[in-house]
Image (tube, rainbow, N blue to C red):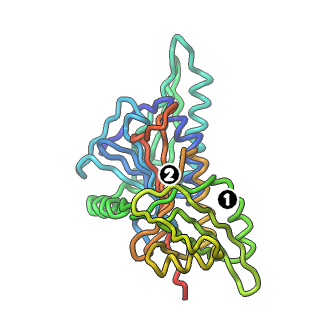
Amino acid sequence: MKFKAFLTENGVNLLEKRFIPSLEKTAKTCHLYFTKTHTLFLHNLLNGDGIQSIAQFTKQVLFDDYRISSQNDDRIAFTIDLSLLLRALRSSVAICNEYSSSAVPNRLQIKLVKKLPSNCSVPTPFLTFETRGFKSAVIQDIPISKPLSRAQVVELQSALDMAQDVPPTLIQVPDLNQLLNLVDRMKHVGDAVNVSISKYGDLTVQVSTTLISLGAEFRKLLVIGDQANAPSEDQNLSAQTRSSRSILRGDAQSVQVSVKHFAKSLQYHLAKPDCAFYGIAPQGSCLTMIFQFFVPGSRETDKSISLHCRLPVLDPD
């Protein structure tokens, strides 16, 4: 089992300044999954607790001279602490910048190694950053879990394949920071938030208790997939009534999710997506958030990067 590659400048910027800080807000640890063509950061795919998130990059967007080999069809996966990864990456980048020069450019290599720690008789796996300069090398080791077995990699890949389903109706959500401010206030009201999405492009977010109700409605948002025209007779009704009637017609779905999970999912704004979409899976099995990235300087989707997450729904009873 071997893996090594050199991080590109773009790869360093994506990971250090955007993606790892946002992924770290979801959970402290995740699976880091390398394949022949992609690198993925996966949260909670092998258990039903918490937010499932998938950040996927083509190898070219992050790495140069990418080499991987394993008996699991050249696939390697393990659990890693994201805060340790971010700290080591930032430190390595600082060292790289300090000692690099135009004559001798510094390159940041990442690789899997096994080392024998002191007072230990069994080799331990590490993900290592190595910065090589003209006269010296600086090495930083990040402890990782034992790499997943063949059966575990197959299970992880199967869970990944199942998590790729796109809801039939997606709506483009307004500014994520605006939603984040709303959800910060919702935390003081209750623990569960009701999210309703209609084929008309309406998004309703509301938390309620016996004493207070706090929420917001966003109307006529961009719809992708299954859509419909809102009945004219509903235009002057209250948001709650409109939502109930659209659900009865089969033109909308509503789910209840944890306010805590909803707030965490909004932290993906740190990854600087160009736009975001919400959708509810068939039978209301989860709330899906899909983040879209454009090729810099264009409105064309950057197919080398993808990020989406799925929030588990609560039992309304």
- Real-space CA distance between mark 2 and mark 1, rounded to the nearest whole angstrom: 15 Å
Residue under label 2, please give it: 291
x then y, percent, for residue 155: 30, 64
Determine whether the residue tagged by mark 2 lies in a helix, strand or loop: strand
> Quadrant location of residue 62?
top left
- Between 89 and 14, which is closer to the camera in this rendering? 14
* Left or right: where 25 falls relative to 248: right
* Left or right: where 266 falls relative to 282: right
> Quadrant location of residue 242?
bottom right
Label whose residue precedes the other's in the sequence (2 or 1) = 1
Q: Quadrant of the C terminus?
A: bottom right
* Residue 82, above or below 212: above
Residue type indicated by callout 1? Leu
Which residue is found at the position 68% from the left and 70% from the top?
215
Residue type indicated by callout 2? Phe
x then y, percent, for residue 87: 60, 44
Residue under label 1, please give it: 180
| Other residues around mark 1 within 10 Å, as few (<14) / some (14–19) / many (≥20) | some
Which residue is found at the position 60% from the left and 79% from the top?
241
Determine whether the residue tagged by mark 1 lies in a helix, strand or loop: helix
> Is there a contact, CB below 8 Å, between mark 2 and mark 1?
no
* Residue 214, above or below 120: below
